[in-house]
Amino acid sequence: MKFLYIEPDQDIRDIYAMKLEADFCADIIAVSDEKEALERYQEQCKNGPNRPDLALVLLDAGVASTNFQALYDFFNKLHKIPFLLLYDGDSLMLLACLDTFLSDHAGNRTLKKPFRPEVFRKTVHECLSSNNNNFNWVKNAENGHNKVKIQNFLKFNSLPCDVFIRLNDMKFVKLLNANDMYTTEVIQKYIDKDVRELYVHQEDYPVLANTGLQNLISLYDRKSEFQSIQELNLESLENIHRAIQEIGLSTEAVTLTTKTIISSVRLAKGVRSIADLLNKMKSSGNYIYDHSMKMSYICTAIAKHTEWGSDSTVFKLSLACTMHDMTLNNDDLARIELLTDPRLKIFTSDEIEAFKNHPQDAAKLIKDSKAFPSDVDFIVAQHHERPDGSGFPHGLLKLRIAPLSCVFILAHEFVNRIEELGNVYNLENRDRVYQALSQEMYTRGNFKKPFEGLRRAFNLAPKNINDT
Ligand SMILES: [Fe+2]
Ligand SMILES: [Fe+2]
């Protein structure tokens, strides 16, 4: 049984194709437009003695073009194959066949984006049940393993399940451990050797397709940027975006990060308890908001220049930047980094207590919401740790702080020091802060790779740094 899936965006296409494979016993013919869909289908008809066992056509209605009618007439009217139209806003109105769409076939359905994974699965089931099939993902497994296109692993740097490479019909060898960090280079090495698929245990496949991919869908499934900026109350992002470019990050990198930030804020604002805090942050003065957004740009730039630069990791860091100080409601308090700072004395004991607890408080809200990928909560919980052990709440040293937290902390330190120089983003201040950081513990232990990332993000010459 096959599904034909038409979606122009490659990232979204890869993710949903994998999700469909995980949820249903089907091979997915994933293509970018209607023309390619017809060509691929006709090619398959030529190759085999029988017509491909096509059970469903899924189409992003936003891309319905002049070829749509031909595609619809061919598959739905002639071959009685149900259609599932995925649409955004009023993109459905563009389709001429809409009047009769639901009555043309008992399995025809429409689904408005964004949708939850379980709603997607249920709707696909409804489309198929008109043919009375019984589907089960386990059937797709080979010797207890399900295959996954290797390029999908480039989107992550850690996964909730073990991943295997196949040596022969019977033999699978473990390549990645569940929840361990892996570098994109490892995956690229196998792609270069022409490996096309990796494998996960069949019982882990739905976990990967649902948990692992769910957040990436919110990253890739973007509404128009302009609409989002207004809707999310992000008007000042434009100014921050412009300021950040003054320190030598490429326009392309900054623009891409702006999109990631919009996706992060949209996801965070989808959680009521967190949306209230973020809205308050914006209205209580500009510092925490401005600081959080600048953090996102710098943190993303560093991560992209390390071996953990996958979309999923960058998204996690951007989410952590957006929410890390959300429980603080005083700009002056938010400027403080260490519990030894004498400026703390002017605050009441309740305010000091709230400051001491803000990393764990924010981490708990993130964890309890269950809306965010793993790691975001611990990055936030560790954001005031420092490599020399002077941080809080645990006074961890440079080798005990998790690598992604180190990326975050380095970016935090960078942004705060620019703030101390009058919050002026220019090459001179950038170089002063970089020089200062290079003479401290930020080049050592688990900070070594993030510091290299910072250097590469700004295209600066390597320094002679000893690892200790
Ligand atoms: Fe903080
Ligand atoms: Fe902060």
Image (cartoon, rainbow, N blue to C red):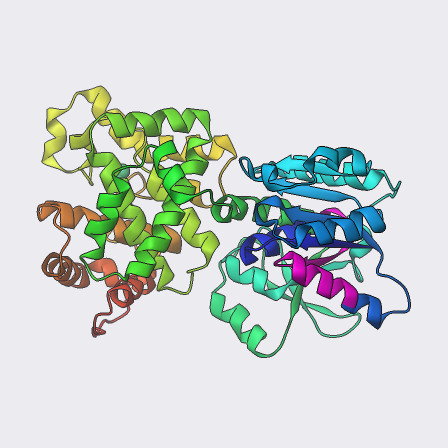
Of 295 and 78, which appears nearest the observer? 78
Of 241 and 174, which appears nearest the observer? 241
In magenta, the rendered stretch is 21-42
Pick the quarter of the image with the N terminus. bottom right
* Relative to 278, residue 177 above or below: below
Q: Is residue 411 magenta?
A: no
Of 169 and 239, which appears nearest the observer? 239
- Farthest-out residue, right: 49
> Could you say which quadrant of the image residue 92 lies in?
top right
* Whole-percent x, y for residue 276 in the image: 37, 24
Residue at 51% across, 35% down: 371
Pick the quarter of the image with the C terminus. bottom left
* Whole-percent x, y for residue 34 in the image: 66, 56
Q: Is residue 178 left or right of residue 78?
A: left
- Farthest-out residue, bottom: 193
Counting labels gives: 0
* Whole-percent x, y for residue 290 in the image: 23, 39
> Could you say which quadrant of the image residue 42 lies in?
bottom right
* Whole-percent x, y for residue 43 in the image: 77, 69
Q: In this view, does 165 lie to the left or right of 258?
A: right
* Relative to 167, residue 5 above or below: above
Of 302 and 166, which appears nearest the observer? 302
Can residue 301 be seen here? no
Residue at 78% across, 57% down: 141
Q: Is residue 417 left or right of residue 401?
A: left
Can residue 55 be seen here? yes
